[in-house]
Image: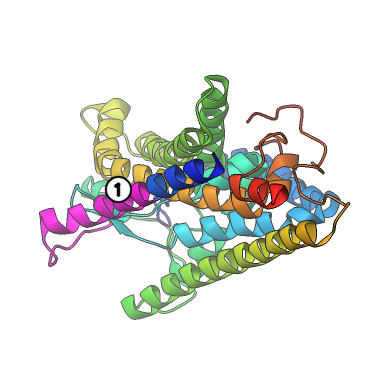
Amino acid sequence: MPERKHRSVRVSTIALVVALLAILIVPLVIHGLDSEFAGTDSAATETVEGSGYRPWFEFRLLPESTELESGIFALQAGLGFGVLGYALGVLNERRRNRNTAATDQTGTDDTPAANPEPSHPDARS
Amino acid sequence: MHIAEGFLPASQCLIWAAAATPFVIHGARAVIKQVREHPERKLLLAAAGAFTFAMSAIKLPSVSGSSSHPTGTGLGAVIFKPPVMAFLSTIVLIFQALLLAHGGLTTLGANIFSMGIVGPWVGYACYRLATRLRASLDVRIFLAMAFADLSTYVFTSFQLALAHPDAASGFGGALAKFLSVFAVTQIPLAIAEGIVGVLLFRFLTQVARPQLTALGILSATDAPAREEAVANA
């Protein structure tokens, strides 16, 4: 039974990844690779400015530069995914150590199934 | 979604900032409490925050021909409950306002309210509703992520319409206008974010089972297939 469940989880994971790629690639196909794909953030400011409104405040710590901007966006994404990847990696290692500890020790069952942390009152499966 | 610097009248900036402040303070306290009382959840909390941090930086193309950012707030809202997301979103928004001139300092309160408060709470509400309807975990996470994302942008449209009602059609007309700018583009991206959330959460159920069980997301009785096989070996 565990094997069958494992396989169906794998199939649905692949299906999800395919769906995700489709959502992100279809726009490129429909609108072409040279398309601008203007951000909705700037579309919003343009809409507002269309009625004659001008921003009353400006704050810039760093010089206005698209290169710098894309660099810092990349930095933000990098930091975010870096920390995320690190955290997931450590959690994965810990899980592996838990599993090997469970199989190494005879007589002491350290699997989470046998030692659940106190269950939250709202717990659902 | 980030309203750009200076695009809300000063009075509304103050109102949103005042409205957001108690949530941010409560969120900061909630984060500190989590870290202090449950240090074994620090990594998971860092992962939730990092996910939002990363998601807010990426721009994705949409079938509408524009592009937009996902929010990533649904994940943290489900795992740690919405209050912490107010604080974590504040960090992201300050970073972007200062270093990228994306969003703004005057509009910080408004942006925190849409991304850090409304988004997470709506996402969490969808999660709880789906749980009550006995939906599978995948469906619950998907709905939480997608609606956290979508509601953030819908609320931003609301904030903008409030500040810039249309000369002819008033608030309603402006709302329709801003929704047409955001909502259509955001729907496929919200779905994409939902899928990413489901995939990420599947991995988390594998590697962070004890913490998620203690947090009440997973029930203690279902052991994962692989660990079951190991235990029975």
Q: Position of residue B29 (x, y in %)?
A: 77, 47
* Residue furthest right as drawn: A107
A75 over B40 or under it: above or below? below
Q: Is residue A43 left or right of residue B55?
A: left
Q: For mark 1, give the secondary structure.
A: helix
User: Looking at the image, which residue is at 52% across and 19% down?
Assistant: B133
B19 over B202 or under it: above or below? above
Q: Position of residue B33 (x, y in %)?
A: 81, 48
Q: Nearer the viewer, residue B197 or B22?
A: B197
The part of the chain drawn in magenta is A14-39
Q: Which residue is mark 1?
A: A19
In the rendered picture of this protein, how many numbered marks are placed on residues?
1
Crowd class of label 1 (few under 14; some 14 to 19; many from 20; radius 10 Å): some
A121 over B228 or under it: above or below? above
Q: Position of residue B184 (x, y in %)?
A: 25, 40
User: Looking at the image, which residue is at 76% across and 27% down?
Assistant: A121
Amino acid type of disc 1? Ala
Its colouring scheme is rainbow
Q: Is residue B211 left or right of residue A108?
A: left
Q: Is residue A108 left or right of residue A93?
A: right
Q: Nearer the viewer, residue B168 or B97?
A: B97
- Using the rendered image of the protein, determine whether residue A45 is visible from the camera's viewpoint: no
| Majority SS type along the magenta span | helix
User: Looking at the image, which residue is at 60% across and 54% down?
Assistant: B48
Label 1: chain letter: A
| Magenta stretch: includes residue A28 | yes
| Magenta stretch: includes residue B170 | no
Q: Quadrant of residue B57?
A: bottom left
- Using the rendered image of the protein, determine whether residue B83 is visible from the camera's viewpoint: yes
User: Looking at the image, which residue is at 43% across and 43% down?
Assistant: A8
Q: Position of residue A117 (x, y in %)?
A: 81, 42
Q: Nearer the viewer, residue B103 or B125?
A: B125
